[in-house]
Each structure stands twice: as C-alpha cells, then as structure tokens.
Amino acid sequence: MRILTASALLLLLIPSIARAAKPVTIAQLDQILLADRGQSDGHVAGQLANLTLTERVTVQRLAS
C-alpha cells in the first residue's frame, strides 16, 4: 500500500516538475507582454502560465 501511495504521489508531481516556472522580473514581464501584443488570449495565457515573478508589484505600478 505504501509503494502505491508513493507512486501515485510521484505521478502527480512529475507534470509540475516538468513545467517548472521561469523566474522573471517586472521589466521582463513588461517586455513579454509588449512582444505578445495582438496575439490570441490563449497564446498569452500559455506564456504567463509558465512564469513566476521574482519581485513584488507595487500598487502604483498596477494602477499605471
């Protein structure tokens, strides 16, 4: 039973490990979004899904 549980857990973790997020700064995110202007929502969402921010976004930055 313990082997089955460990195997199931490993199978659940493999996809998340394979899709490790790319760390980006706010400036890099801005560049990505500018380059993707005019692309489909699905395309942009696919790119954003693989990113993780390395810094916090300020309230002032979000408002601009």
Image: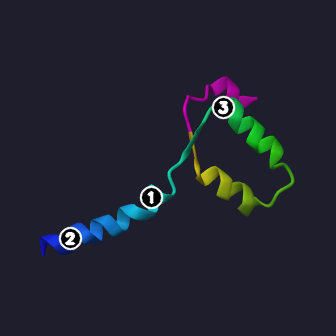
Taking the spot 74% from the left edge, 36% from the top edge, the residue there is: 30
Asked whether residue 58 is drawn in magenta, I would say yes
Per the model, the C-alpha gap separating discs 1 and 3 is 23 Å
Q: Position of residue 43 (x, y in %)?
A: 73, 60
Mark 2, secondary structure of its residue: helix
Look at mark 2 in the image and give the residue it sits on: 5
Taking the spot 36% from the left edge, 66% from the top edge, the residue there is: 12
Instruction: Work out which residue is located at the far right of the displayed protein and give it.
Output: 38
Q: Amino acid at mark 3?
A: Ile
Front residue of 9/33: it is 9
- The numbered dot on residue 16 is 1
> Quadrant where the N terminus lies?
bottom left
Give the residues drawn in magenta, as a range: 53-64
Per the model, the C-alpha gap separating discs 2 and 3 is 40 Å
Q: Is residue 10 visible?
A: yes
Mark 1, secondary structure of its residue: helix
Q: Amino acid at mark 2?
A: Thr
Q: Position of residue 50 (x, y in %)?
A: 59, 51
Look at mark 3 in the image and give the residue it sits on: 26
